[in-house]
Image: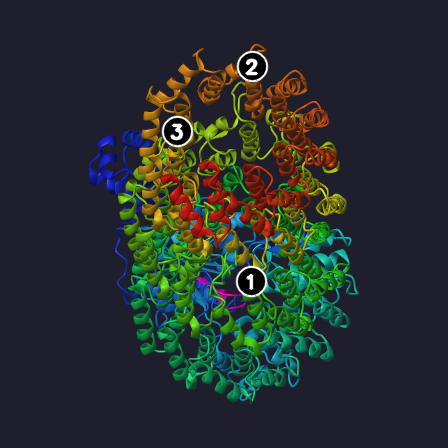
């Protein structure tokens, strides 16, 4: 016999811990003293270990002792109960119904009572006749949804929101969009032990249970009717509400008391608890529990389900049948664990409705025909598919006689309630005037709680009228006679739950003001809730009833909704679909808007049409639908919806035309698959005549190679239900797809779900598919949610497997938090107990270290959905997020929007926040337009202004195209009245030069609004896939599938494949192409993987970057093939980057293993590898294997001082995300000699980890912020970090404002301060922008400073892109701009001229090699850079140092050039003058070369024959390459530091290089020792500036003393003053004071005065005129060398003025040749357009044989670089000179 649920739970706990520990069952067996077979039985629930073995298991697997013991005890008790039951059930049951035993008298009494009860309808509707059971069918429904997306589907767990309003929980998203084959009740009961039957209100669930119990009871009484099921069972039909209220009793006793409550006097003998606790005469009880949804308390509902799970356990004396309204699958998990098959009652189709009418009006000739005709005339066909409503309609039909039936549900119910009042006339009574109010009160009570209706009625009445003796009986009689209530035992019950809903809605409607006013708080709350999709179902009912109670307000309500945006239009359409009584003119107006929506492909527009097409009460609907159907310009989706309404719902005389259209669409393969599927589904509902056409269309969908698997699944399930041939075709198609090894996980789940829906024979195989998807090690949730829910529906064991898999995913720290949140929310869907576990996981995630704002929002939203976080708590968090100065505009926008979603009470606050975003000068992205769109949706007083601003942005050609497109999208969603305007502006936008991403968005929006542009848009989308030269960024869309039509898929794929393999493109473009190919269609997954494999063969690092998480969407075989190749590459590669990027690719593919971890660990512990690469390897290793996480943290912490602080902080945060405790490493002891930036990063890291201020950390930040000698770049970081936690930012803003206003401060500091100030206080924007703009046009602002100001003004959103291009290009074209300045100026330029300027920079041979050949090369310039670099390597005019630089650039341009570069560098390294430079470059050519370089450099260190300066350079090189100095280098440095024979300069250098080992105290000693030469003290002070605050204060004092000492060498004084500039504002002020005194001191050498003037200009920008005046005077000196020195200094401040003088000196042949040559060099460096005089001068000097050779060589080199005309002559001369 199968183990019980507690036994399985214990087994699952053991197996989960064994799997988590990654140990085998053999390993467990050896440690607990059991055999391997017994351990297997323990893990399978077939063997329960002894207590001694349990203790051993707890120790071996690290089980939680308390939990494990509790589970073991429960399993032990369950096993004993199971054994007792087995012994008690040994009596053989009867073989069939022909050999029934005699039952005890008490049981026969119970059967007779059930037989009597079944003679009436379950709710005893007065006036009703008995329906026939043969009209009721059930159908299998093993998903979690219903056949259609019924957004009116009721929920069973009503809850009150924080305003006390009824808010229904969101229904599960519908999974089944199609109808499986129908099955009879007997087929379902014969095929399944336990059954769950779902159905909507009035669907016939209670009728089914009553009639089933009655028919079985009649069979026991000797009836000759066919047996309702094959197994002889004893029926026991009880209501769930009665049973749920008695669960505090032992279950047999609860059953007995429920029997008494439900059947009362119908029983003539009591059944005892012992009789219902076991089989009766060998027969099982058929426990029929009706109306689970009517148990209002979720806790009671959950308890009842768990009890029923026990009843359905193996060996139980019960078979269980439960009926309920649809409830989300997670709530029903206990029944699923008990293997209860889920079925859904099939609503009446046309044939069933006809049979119902014939049975009802049997004996009344013609009545059935008239009834059906009236139903169709009133357009009630869809409504009366619900049996209860059909019954009520039949009763009213009889009562109305010749009058027509009401045409809506509200009037039907009202008519029936009115009928109840007149059906049994009674004398006036004391409660008559209370009838309506009392009934509505009771409706509310029933909807909200499970308390006694009788008690509620008595309490309510006694508070309103005087009572008398016997009044309670009078009240009961009154209620049962005058209302939809019936007495059951000592309580009252509604005839049907839908009556309670109807009355509760009416009660809510009556409390609203008589006049509709959207601003009234009650209406505001109601409308907000009504707009919330499924959660707003009851609110919509209240609104509908309000319009029925106040028909004159219906038009006002519809007009108000009509004036809103798309979501308001959807609500209006839903209300009209329920026949809201709006006037014809109002409905016509709304239909005109609906028609405009129908002309688009906007999804909300489709929702409006779907509901509006059900407004059958409107007389103009049919011609309106016909007109839409016939409109060739309308999208197919809209025409199909119109045809479906006409052909399947309205069934007018025009139905044939609609059917013809549907048939044509189905057969037209040029139409999109989704549209053809919709048409085929509609045809399947049009009767047997259209079955062939429907099947033909569905088969075509299944064989379409471009069809999505979701469409194939839907087509297969529909097709399987049409015929046996269709079923065979559908199952074969799905099985073939399932066998395809290239099928991705998400598609496999769709296929398997379709097979599950078709038949039980596929369940086992599909379960294995679901399980394989859940256990796939890929780091993605793609397909897993659906796999888990589908797997859980297949039985208890499968549910446990699904929950375990999701629990493991939610706890896997390697996964991104978004994936873990998705796993937790999926887990919550599996049942209440899992919901609790999921909520706890989310709380744990919220407390994890290093959460980003978007991650917090994702977790918060999930917690809100699960009820794990209250609205007030969420609102507090969202407010804090919005006000956090560290939040970007996107974070702030989503915080405001989420706040608005919490409820109407938050809407005004959210509107204020959104308005702040819209008005924020720093917000220039899509968030601004999105905020305006959201404000417009709020209605007045926000809508008019928001719409005006959106339209203004849309129409303004000066606004960035991307923002105009976003404004277009937001405006289009506000209503069709704006669509014409939006289309016109989109066409205007598309006529301009757009980025590909903007153009794609514009075309997609345009095509959705105007179908005339569909073909042009489709063509454009394909054309946009071609990479555009010079365009930066991520191509088209990073996170979206390319909007390519099915007809152009292959062409698009071809373009993307070409882009993928084009190494001349930026990697972002190629990554984008890779992503788009993967998302385009599964057909392209194999080609893209083959392309990536080919790239791995040529450039593994580049190929590794192309593999992102998007590959998780590919099939396991595709990922396996790619992973195998990566494993091979990693194993054979010695390249560090290749190993790490390959390992990360393996993680993305879910194919990493121990070998990959070993390779990465080898990199991490390799001291030759760059420190930041070792840190990268450490975090990658932690992701590969969490067992190494502690070692990874130690490595990252040890490398802190050897890497940029940002890298160190990022890596520690990443390790914290993976679960490491890094807080100890973030706290920096003040005693350590650490760089200030690292100390600050540690403080910020502590705050990031804890998410709240820490007094020690905040104190450290305050000290940094208050340190005036600290560079503002770091002080500003400290100020902004403090601003996140300081209650008041006044001091901070004051500090920042002082920097902005400091005219002496450097431009970059003032710009940074301005940006930070505006971030803290937006009111300062205008003042800050004005200041920076004024700086931009100041005469003394250098070109480099202009570049900084352009960037800062751009950051402040003070410049549009056109202005950025204009200003930046002006700098780039300026003849005096240096190459580095020009390149920096182009960073934010989008103008096409940028590409030409960049190429010019690379090819300009007059520029220094280091500035024209970048080490990081844009792929678009790779060929140009390669050619230029090779020219440098091969040309004689370039120095060896230039050749090293060129070699580095060549390697950066193409990895294929590395061997060539290595050869060149090895040659250069053979020369002592360039060996260290060449070695440094060679080290970047791969780890083997780095290892060789380190070895050779250490050889130099240890070679006593090498000069000291060479050995010190070797130590410097080793330190830069490996970070942590090897022992031999440390020992060498210690010898130098302690060697009194060594110069003080070398000793200081050695001491400083030992700072990570021995600290900096020795350096401080040298700085403070006045016996040490001043030059050395200056160097020591400068070296210590980045460490302690006292170092900066003391260093500034030392430097100022040296600089101000007139007795010192002027050059030393200038150097000290220059160093002093680095010591904050006080240092700059002192430096300026000393420099000015030196610059004007005529007694000093001219060169010293020039240097002093330079220091003055650098230290105080506002004193540049003084510095320039000094330089002008010095430029007139008679000494040409001094004059040249002064002019070079002038060029930095007044380049044009210096140019004229330099040109004159260059032309002056009377000057010494060397001075003339240097003047020419200065002229070329200062002005590109004055090279001709320089060329002439260089040529004359080079060919002047009287001059020294070294002067001529220098001139020849200049000539070769400056002049293409004389280059060959110059090169010949250079070849000749060494020979002479």
Mark 3, other Cα within 10 Å: few <14 / some 14–19 / many ≥20: many
Q: Which residues are magenta?
A: 195-206
Does residue 389 appear left or right of residue 1323 in this picture?
left
What residue is rendered at 68% in x and 75% in y? Answer: 590
| Circle 3/circle 1 CB separation < 8 Å | no
| Spatial CA span between label 3 and label 1 | 46 Å
For label 1, the residue is 995
Assign a secondary structure to mark 3. Answer: helix
Is residue 834 inside the magenta stretch? no
Assign a secondary structure to mark 2. Answer: loop
Q: Nearer the viewer, mark 2 or mark 3?
A: 2
Tag shown at residue 1573: 2
Q: Nearer the viewer, mark 3 or mark 1?
A: 3
What residue is rendered at 44% in x and 61% in y? Answer: 1076
| Circle 2/circle 1 CB separation < 8 Å | no
Is residue 201 inside the magenta stretch? yes
Does residue 1047 appear left or right of residue 1131 in this picture?
right
| Spatial CA span between label 2 and label 1 | 61 Å
């Amino acid at each position: 016999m199968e183990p019980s649920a507690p036994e399985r739970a214990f087994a699952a706990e053991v197996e989960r811990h064994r799997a988590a520990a990654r140990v085998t069952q053999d390993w467990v067996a050896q440690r607990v003293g059991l055999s391997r077979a017994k351990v297997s039985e323990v893990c399978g629930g077939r063997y329960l270990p002894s207590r001694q073995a349990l203790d051993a298991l707890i120790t071996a697997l690290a089980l939680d002792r308390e939990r494990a013991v509790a589970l073991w005890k429960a399993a032990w008790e369950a096993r004993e109960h199971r054994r007792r039951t087995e012994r008690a059930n040994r009596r053989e049951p009867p073989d069939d119904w022909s050999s029934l035993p005699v039952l005890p008298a008490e049981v026969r009494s119970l059967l007779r009572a059930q037989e009597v009860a079944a003679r009436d309808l379950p709710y005893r509707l007065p006036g009703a006749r008995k329906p026939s059971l043969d009209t009721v069918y059930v159908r299998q429904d093993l998903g979690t949804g219903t056949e259609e997306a019924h957004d009116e589907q009721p929920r069973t767990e009503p809850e009150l929101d924080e305003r006390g309003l009824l808010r229904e929980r969101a229904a599960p998203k519908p999974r089944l969009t199609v109808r499986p084959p129908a099955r009879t009740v007997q087929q379902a009961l014969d095929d399944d032990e336990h059954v769950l039957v779902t159905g909507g209100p009035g669907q016939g669930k209670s009728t089914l249970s009553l009639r089933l119990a009655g028919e079985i009871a009649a069979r026991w009484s000797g009836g000759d009717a066919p047996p309702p099921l094959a197994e002889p069972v004893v029926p026991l039909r009880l209501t769930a509400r009665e049973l749920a209220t008695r669960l505090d009793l032992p279950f047999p006793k609860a059953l007995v008391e429920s029997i008494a409550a439900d059947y009362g006097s119908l029983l003539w003998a009591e059944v005892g608890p012992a009789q219902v606790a076991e089989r009766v005469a060998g027969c099982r009880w058929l426990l029929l529990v009706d109306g689970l949804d009517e148990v209002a308390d979720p806790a009671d509902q959950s308890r009842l389900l768990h009890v029923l799970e026990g009843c359905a356990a193996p060996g139980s004396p019960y078979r269980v049948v439960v009926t309920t309204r649809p409830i989300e699958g997670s709530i029903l998990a206990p029944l699923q664990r008990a293997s209860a098959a889920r079925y859904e009652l099939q609503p009446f189709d046309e044939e069933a409705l006809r049979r119902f009418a014939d049975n009802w009006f049997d004996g009344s000739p013609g009545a059935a025909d008239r009834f059906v005709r009236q139903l169709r005339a009133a357009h009630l066909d869809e409504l009366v598919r619900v049996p209860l409503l059909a019954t009520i309609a039949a009763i009213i039909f009889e009562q109305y006689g010749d009058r027509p039936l009401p045409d809506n549900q509200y009037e039907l119910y009202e008519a029936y309630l009115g009928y109840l009042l007149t059906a049994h006339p009674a004398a006036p009574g004391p409660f008559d005037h209370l009838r309506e109010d009392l009934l509505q009160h009771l409706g509310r009570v029933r909807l909200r709680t499970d308390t006694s209706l009788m008690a509620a009625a008595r309490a309510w009445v006694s508070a309103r009228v005087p009572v008398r003796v016997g009044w309670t009986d009078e009240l009961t009689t009154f209620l049962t006679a005058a209302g939809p209530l019936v007495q059951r035992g000592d309580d009252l019950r509604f005839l049907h739950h839908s009556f309670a809903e109807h009355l509760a809605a009416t009660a809510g409607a009556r409390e609203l003001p008589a006049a509709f006013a959207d601003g009234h708080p009650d209406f505001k709350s109601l409308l907000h809730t009504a707009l919330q999709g499924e959660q707003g179902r009851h609110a919509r009912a209240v609104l509908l009833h309000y319009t029925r109670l106040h028909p004159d307000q219906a038009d006002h309500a519809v007009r108000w909704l009509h004036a809103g945006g798309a979501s308001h239009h959807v609500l209006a359409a839903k209300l009209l679909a329920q026949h809201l009584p709006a006037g014809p003119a109002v409905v016509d107006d709304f239909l005109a808007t609906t028609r405009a929506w129908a002309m688009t492909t906007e999804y909300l527009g489709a929702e409006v049409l779907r509901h509006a097409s059900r407004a059958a009460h409107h007389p103009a609907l049919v011609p309106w639908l016909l007109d839409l159907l016939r409109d060739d310009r309308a999208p197919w989706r809209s025409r199909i919806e119109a045809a479906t309404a006409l052909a399947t719902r309205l069934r007018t005389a025009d139905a044939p035309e609609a059917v013809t259209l549907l048939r044509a669409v189905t057969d037209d393969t040029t139409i999109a698959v989704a549209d053809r599927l919709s048409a085929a589904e509609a045809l399947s509902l049009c009767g047997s005549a259209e079955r062939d056409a429907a099947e033909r269309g569905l088969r075509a969908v299944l064989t379409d190679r471009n069809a999505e698997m979701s469409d194939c699944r839907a087509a297969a399930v529909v097709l399987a239900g049409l015929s046996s041939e269709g079923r065979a075709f559908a199952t074969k198609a799905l099985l073939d797809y399932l066998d395809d090894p290239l099928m991705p996980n998400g598609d496999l789940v769709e296929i398997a779900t379709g097979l599950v829906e078709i038949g039980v024979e596929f369940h086992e195989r599909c379960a294995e598919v679901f399980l394989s998807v859940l256990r796939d090690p890929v780091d993605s949730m793609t397909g897993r949610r659906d796999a888990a829910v589908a797997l859980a529906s297949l039985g208890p064991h499968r549910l446990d497997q699904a929950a375990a898999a999701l629990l493991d995913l939610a706890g896997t720290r390697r996964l991104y938090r978004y994936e873990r949140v998705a796993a937790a929310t999926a887990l919550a869907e599996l049942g209440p107990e899992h919901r609790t576990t999921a909520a706890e996981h989310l709380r744990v995630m919220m407390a994890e270290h290093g959460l980003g704002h978007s991650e917090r929002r994702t977790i918060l939203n999930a917690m809100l959905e699960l009820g794990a976080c209250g609205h007030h708590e969420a609102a507090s968090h969202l407010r804090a997020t919005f006000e956090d100065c560290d939040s970007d505009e996107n974070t702030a926008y989503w915080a405001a929007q989420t706040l608005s979603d919490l409820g109407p009470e938050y809407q005004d606050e959210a509107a204020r926040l959104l308005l702040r975003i819209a008005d924020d000068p720093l917000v220039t992205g899509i968030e601004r337009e999105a905020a305006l769109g959201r404000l417009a949706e709020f209605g007045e007083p926000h809508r008019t202004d928001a719409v005006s601003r959106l339209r203004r942005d849309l129409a303004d050609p000066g606004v960035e195209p991307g923002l105009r497109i976003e404004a277009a999208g937001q405006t289009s969603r506000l209503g069709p009245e704006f669509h014409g305007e939006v289309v016109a502006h989109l066409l205007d936008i598309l006529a301009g030069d757009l980025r590909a991403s903007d153009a794609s968005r514009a075309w997609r929006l345009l095509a959705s609004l105007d179908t005339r542009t569909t073909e042009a848009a489709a063509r454009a989308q394909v054309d946009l896939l071609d990479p555009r030269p010079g365009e930066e960024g991520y191509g088209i869309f990073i996170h979206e599938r390319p909007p390519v039509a099915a007809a152009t898929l292959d062409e698009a794929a071809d373009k993307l494949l070409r882009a993928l393999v084009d190494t001349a493109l930026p990697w972002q473009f190629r990554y984008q192409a890779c992503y788009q190919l993967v998302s385009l269609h599964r057909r392209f997954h194999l080609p893209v993987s083959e392309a990536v494999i080919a790239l791995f063969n040529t450039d593994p690092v580049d190929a590794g970057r192309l593999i992102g998480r998007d590959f998780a969407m590919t099939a396991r075989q595709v990922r396996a093939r790619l992973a195998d190749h990566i494993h091979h590459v990693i194993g054979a590669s010695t390249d560090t980057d290749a190993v790490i990027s390959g390992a990360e690719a393996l993680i993305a593919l879910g194919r990493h293993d121990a070998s990959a971890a070993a390779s990465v660990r080898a990199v991490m512990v390799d001291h030759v590898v760059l420190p930041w690469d070792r840190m990268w390897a450490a975090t990658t290793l932690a992701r590969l294997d969490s067992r190494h996480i502690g070692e990874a943290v130690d490595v990252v912490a040890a490398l802190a001082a050897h890497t940029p602080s940002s890298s160190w902080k990022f890596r520690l945060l990443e390790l914290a995300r993976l679960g490491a405790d890094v807080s100890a490493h973030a706290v920096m002891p003040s005693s350590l000699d650490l760089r200030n930036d690292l100390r600050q990063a540690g403080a910020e890291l502590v705050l990031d980890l804890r998410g709240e201020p820490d007094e020690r950390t905040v104190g450290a930040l305050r000290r940094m912020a208050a340190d005036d000698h600290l560079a503002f770049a770091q002080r500003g970081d400290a100020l902004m970090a403090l601003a996140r936690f300081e209650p008041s930012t006044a001091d901070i803003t004051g500090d920042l404002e002082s920097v902005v206003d400091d005219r002496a401060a450097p431009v970059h500091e003032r710009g940074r301060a301005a940006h930070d100030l505006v971030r803290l206080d937006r009111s300062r924007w205008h003042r800050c922008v004005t200041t920076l703009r004024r700086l931009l046009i100041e005469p003394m602002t250098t070109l480099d400073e202009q570049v900084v100001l352009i960037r800062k003004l751009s950051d402040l959103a003070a410049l549009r892109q056109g202005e950025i291009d204009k200003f930046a290009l002006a700098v780039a074209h300026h003849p005096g701009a240096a190459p580095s300045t020009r390149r920096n100026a182009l960073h934010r330029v989008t103008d096409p001229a940028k590409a030409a300027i960049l190429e010019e920079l690379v090819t300009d041979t007059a520029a220094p090699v280091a500035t024209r050949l970048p080490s990081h090369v844009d792929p678009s310039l790779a060929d140009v850079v390669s050619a230029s670099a090779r020219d440098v390597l091969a040309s004689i005019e370039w120095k060896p140092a230039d050749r090293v630089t060129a070699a580095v650039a060549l390697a950066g341009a193409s990895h294929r050039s590395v061997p060539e570069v290595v050869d060149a560098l090895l040659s250069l390294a053979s020369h002592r003058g360039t060996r260290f430079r060449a070695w440094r470059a060679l080290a970047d050519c791969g780890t083997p070369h780095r290892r060789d370089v380190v070895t050779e450099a250490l050889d130099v260190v240890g070679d006593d024959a090498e000069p000291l300066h060479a050995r010190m350079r070797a130590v410097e090189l080793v330190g830069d390459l490996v970070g942590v100095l090897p022992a031999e280098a440390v020992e060498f440095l210690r010898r130098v530091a302690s060697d009194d024979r060594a110069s003080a300069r070398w000793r200081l250098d050695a001491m400083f290089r030992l700072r990570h080992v021995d600290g900096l105290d020795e350096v401080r000693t040298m700085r403070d020792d006045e016996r040490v030469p001043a030059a050395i003290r200056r160097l020591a002070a400068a070296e210590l500036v980045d460490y302690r605050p006292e170092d900066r204060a003391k260093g500034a004092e030392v430097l100022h003393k040296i600089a101000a000492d007139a007795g010192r060498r002027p050059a030393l004084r200038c150097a000290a003053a220059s160093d002093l500039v680095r010591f904050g504002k006080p240092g700059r002020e002192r430096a300026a004071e000393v420099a000015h005194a030196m610059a004007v001191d005529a007694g000093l050498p001219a060169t010293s005065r020039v240097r002093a003037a330079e220091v003055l200009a650098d230290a105080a920008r506002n004193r540049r005129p003084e510095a320039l005046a000094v330089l002008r005077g010095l430029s007139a000196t008679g000494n040409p060398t001094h004059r040249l020195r002064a002019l070079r200094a002038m060029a930095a401040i007044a380049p044009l003025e210096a140019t004229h003088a330099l040109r004159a000196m260059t032309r002056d042949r009377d000057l010494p040749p060397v001075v003339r040559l240097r003047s020419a060099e200065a002229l070329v460096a200062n002005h590109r357009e004055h090279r001709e005089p320089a060329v002439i001068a260089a040529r004359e000097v080079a060919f002047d044989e009287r001059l020294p050779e070294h002067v001529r060589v220098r001139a020849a080199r200049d000539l070769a670089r400056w002049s293409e005309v004389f280059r060959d002559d110059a090169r010949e001369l250079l070849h000749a000179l060494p020979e002479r």
